[in-house]
Image (cartoon, grey):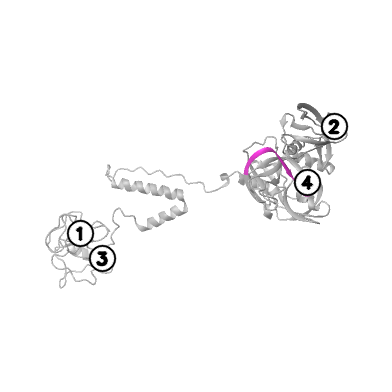
Amino acid sequence: MSEQYPPAGDRPDPDGAGSRPGAQPSPDGPIEQGGQRPWFPFQDSVNQAPPGPGQPFRPSTDPGQPPRPPQGGTGWPQQWVGPSGTWPPDVGAAPPPGSGLMPMAAYQAAGPPAPAEARRGRVPWVPVVVLALLVGLGGGVGGALLVDAGKDADDRSAPSTSSPTDPQEPAPTPAAPVAGGPGLSPVIAVAAKVLPSVVSLDVEGARSDVSGSGFVYDDEGHVVTNNHVIEPAADEGDITVSLSDGREVNAEIVGRSPAYDLAVIKLDEPPGVPAVSLGSSDGVAVGQSVVAIGSPLGLNATVTSGIISATQRPVTAGGRGETSYINALQTDAAINPGNSGGPLVDLDGRVIGVNSAIATLGSAAERQRGNIGVGFSIPVDQVISTVEQILETGHAEYPIIGAQVSVENDTAGARVQDVSTDSPAQQAGLEDGDLITAINEEEVSDGVELIVKIRSFAPGETVTLEVSRGGQVESYDVVLGSQIG
C-alpha cells in the first residue's frame, strides 16, 4: 500500500474536529486513537452508506466501482480526490503539491483508481518465492542473492548523496560456475580412449562359472586378463568375450601364469577394436591419479578413478591353484569382484597395471567382499614380460632361489625351511634355518615379501641376500634359477 495522504500532523479528523497532530498511519492497517473511527481510505464502500459531513471519502476497492458521491448529490464540487481519499472533506481548498489528488470531475472521468503499490520496505511475494527456489536449487547462488539483497536494503535506507540523474556504476556480475563439459575432468578423455579396448569375460568351467574383465593387447586378437578369471576353463570349459561394440566372441587360452596371476586368450575372430596403449610402471609415484576400467559385478564398461596409494606392496592372490605373489601397485580407485583382469591406466590412457585383488574385512565366513578403497594391480612392466613369454612359448617362467621359506610374519625376516639339492641357494651356501633379512640391501620382513621381491627379477639375474646365522650376518650372491608356472 502506498503512503497515505494527508501526512501525519495534518490529517483531517474523521469527526470533523480539524487535524489530529501526531497521528501516524499504520503500515498494516488503521489506527485506533481515543475511541474514534480510524482514518483508512481503502475500505470497501459498496455496501456502506455515503460519508457524512466531515468524513473522508472512501473509494471502493472493487475495480468495477467508480467513486461514489454523497447521497442525493451529483458530484463533489471543489473537492479533490485520489487513491488516498479526499481533500478536504467539505471545503474547496486545493491539496498540497505532490499529493497525487485531482479535482473530482477529472477523477470521475479517469475511471476507477489503479491498485495501490506495496508499502515501501516490504518485499513483494513473487520475488520472495523465486529467491526461495534459488536457495533450494543452488545454495551458493541463493546465499549471494541474500547478501546482495540485504546490502541493497541498507543502501536504500541511507541518505542519498547523488541526484537522480547521476550515472550509476553497474554492479559487477559474478562469473557463472562451470556446469560441465570436456574440461571438467581428464577422466572423460581417458574413458573415451580406453573403453573401446576393454572387454568383459564370462567363463564356464566344469566346477564353477566366473566373470571378469580384460583388455585387447594387440591387433591379432590377444586379450590379457587374470589367471584366476580363466582358471575354471583351463582344463575344459568355454570363454565368451563381450566386446565394446556389443559383439560376443568365443576365445581360447593361449597360456597362463599362476605365479603372476596373468593369462592370455585369443579371440576366434578379429576384435575390430583398437589395442590399448602400454605405459610403464617403473616411474609410477604415490599420489598419481589413475583410472580403473572393467566390469565389476557384471556391470560392463564401468569407470572409476583414484590415486596410487602405495607401490611395491607385497600381495598374495590367485584361484584354486598355485598362489600368486605380486609386487603390486595399491590404489583407492574402486575395484570390486568382476574388475579382475581389467586395466589400471594413467591420465594419458596408458596401461600401468592389471587389476587383480582387493583387501577384505572380517573372517573368511563374514568378510566384506566389496570395495573398501584398497585394491591391488600387477605392475605393467611385469605384465609385459610375462605376456611376451606366453606369446612366444605358450608359458611363462619365474625366478627362484631353490629354497622353501616360511610365510609366517613372526620373525624379522624370511626363515629358510628347506634348501633344495643343487639349487641356486645351495650353490650360494645357504642352509636350513638361515634367516634372510635383506635382498640387494632392501630389508624383508617375512617370506612373502622375499618371494615377491625375488619375482620382480628375471631368471639368470644375480641377487645379494643378507643372511643371519648364529648371530652373525653375512652376504651371499645367488644366481636366480627358473621355473615354469
For badge 3, the amino acid type reads Pro
Label 3 sits on residue: 112
Tag 1 secondary structure? loop
User: Which mark sits nearer the N-terminus, 4 or 3?
Assistant: 3
User: Which mark sits nearer the N-terminus, 3 or 2?
Assistant: 3
Label 2 sits on residue: 426
Label 4 sits on residue: 263
Where in the figure is residue 125, as x and y percent of width and height?
36, 58
Of residues 206 and 475, the one nearer the viewer is 475
Q: Nearer the viewer, mark 1 or mark 2?
A: 2
Range of the magenta residues?
306-322
Q: Nearer the viewer, mark 4 or mark 1?
A: 4
For badge 4, the amino acid type reads Ala
Q: Is residue 201 visible?
A: no
Mark carried by residue 101:
1
Magenta-colored stretch includes residue 311: yes
